[in-house]
Amino acid sequence: MAQSVEEQIQQFQNGLERRNPGETEFHQAVAEVAGSIIPFIQDKPLYREMRILERLAEPDRIIIFRVCWEDDAGNTRVNRGYRVQNNNAIGPYKGGLRFHPSVTLSILKFLAFEQTFKNSLTGLPMGGGKGGSDFNPKGKSDNEIMRFCQSFMTELRRHIGPDIDVPAGDIGVGAREIGYMFGQYKRLTNEFTGSLTGKGLEFGGSLIRTEATGYGAVYMLDNMLQAAGNSLDGKRVAISGSGNVALYAAEKARHLGGKVVSLSDSSGSIYDPEGIDEEKLSYMVDLKTVRRGRIDEYAKEFGTEFYAGKRPWHIQCDVALPCATQNEVSLKDAKTLLKNGCIAVSEGANMPTEQAGIDAYLEAKILFAPSKAANAGGVAVSGLEMSQNSARISWKEEELQDLLRNIMSDIHERCAENGREGDYINYLRGANIAGFIKVADAMLAFGIV
Ligand code: NDP
Ligand code: 2IT
């Protein structure tokens, strides 16, 4: 007897878990995609026979290496470096580097898998990859960061290049780290090429790359609200995180009429019911990007609430933007958001909502933009940085702003077209299917490789 779709999903997932034991984040990311793709390919035998989904869930290549460096006290330190090159069917591997003590192979495999679909959704020619290290940048001096980045790049450079694999930033990797890594790449190869994105403007970086992920997540939110006949105007916006993505999501949400009432870091959340205005946001940008301080300083400075050790999801809000890290919205948090009347969630972080939380959003039929669509603005502008580097030109800010807005609106359209379920748009299903088709068709063209 033929297997039901549910049985096929279960069998696929059992095989994945058997082949990748203990890699829970990777299992989670693949299961979320399989739940959309296996039903979609039921009447598409070529995709099934050619095992496209199975191949997508087996990275092309994984590189793991030792990173030795010397701290300021002269001690020898040892970390582990990784690059997961998931799939290059539609372009060179592309994706960020994460430096955080929680980094494991499972986390980087989930991120590289997601990146493959995300990059496809942008419409630009980029494959999917991700890398990083369990190195903890917190509390390290600039010199220690520099020595770590140089040692990391000494190995990584063998595996990357402008037409091979182009890394960028992610958690713990910003302009400072990219600068050190690019400097070392250039020194070792004697080549000035676009081998990394997120570079400084003086050496080939693109305008608006810093802002692009946060802005893009808000454009996606705005596009969903508008398609539903609503707008951001006057909405209370809860944001988690206070890093690269969160700070620029806050800026754009405010520009489009929203009132940002929270931000957070790993020590807790601040709640500012009056809204984080321009002046308070510049204080936060300085606190987080220049002084690298903790978020309770904001609460002390402006006399607002600080919830130690808590995420912001209990705060009353109309829309939510999780912009910190994976699995930061549990089922309980998702239910609290829904109970408080939250009507839309746009994921700036990668896989921030647990699967059961996503199921709760979809059941309640709120507007939900999954990370691979919502945060694609960052890698999209990275793709534009690659184009500018190849052509040895720099585009003007207005051109890039228009390109980002258009790319996000195209992503919204692609997800809506593939995710329509009667009156409701299931953007999760839409993103998975739209991202899948382009990569799958390229893989079919190559035959069995
Ligand atoms: P940053 O390092 O700039 O900021 C991360 C923020 O999240 C900080 O406020 C940090 O707090 C908080 N955070 C990180 N890990 C945890 C944790 N385990 N628990 C609680 N809080 C945590 O990173 P980005 O802003 O670049 O990245 C944020 C998210 O967005 C990630 O999921 C990333 O993958 C995703 N993303 C980033 C893109 C980019 O262009 N940078 C593009 C697309 C997605 P603290 O400082 O206390 O650690
Ligand atoms: O998750 C992501 O999309 C990123 N960290 C950005 C990747 C990139 O290559 O700009």
Image (cartoon, helix red, strand yellow):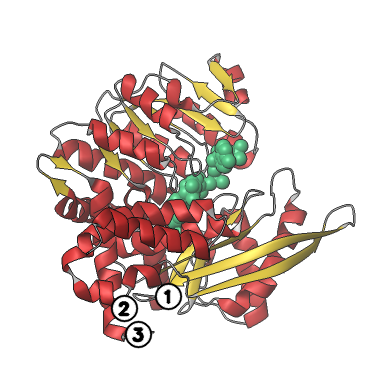
Work out which quarter of the rendered image holds the C terminus and state it: bottom left
Hey, what amino acid is under mark 1?
A: Pro
- Give the residue at mark 2: 443
Kindly check if marks 2 and 1 are in contact, taking CB atoms under 8 A apart as contact: no
Point out which mark residue 92 bears. Answer: 1
| Foreground tag (3 vs 2) | 3
Disc 2 Cβ-to-ligand 2 distance below 8 Å:
no
Is residue 449 placed above or below 86 in the rendered structure?
below
Task: Please tell me in which quadrant of the rendered image residue 57 appears.
Answer: bottom left
Hey, what amino acid is under mark 3?
A: Ile
Left or right: 280, with 230 as reference point? right
Pick the front one: 316 or 208: 316
Point out which mark residue 200 bears. Answer: none
Rendered location of residue 98, percent (x, y): 58, 55
Residue at 43% x, 28% y: name it. 333
Could you give the CA–CA distance between mark 2 and mark 1, rounded to whole angstroms?
A: 14 Å
Rendered location of residue 309, percent (x, y): 60, 26
| Foreground tag (1 vs 3) | 3
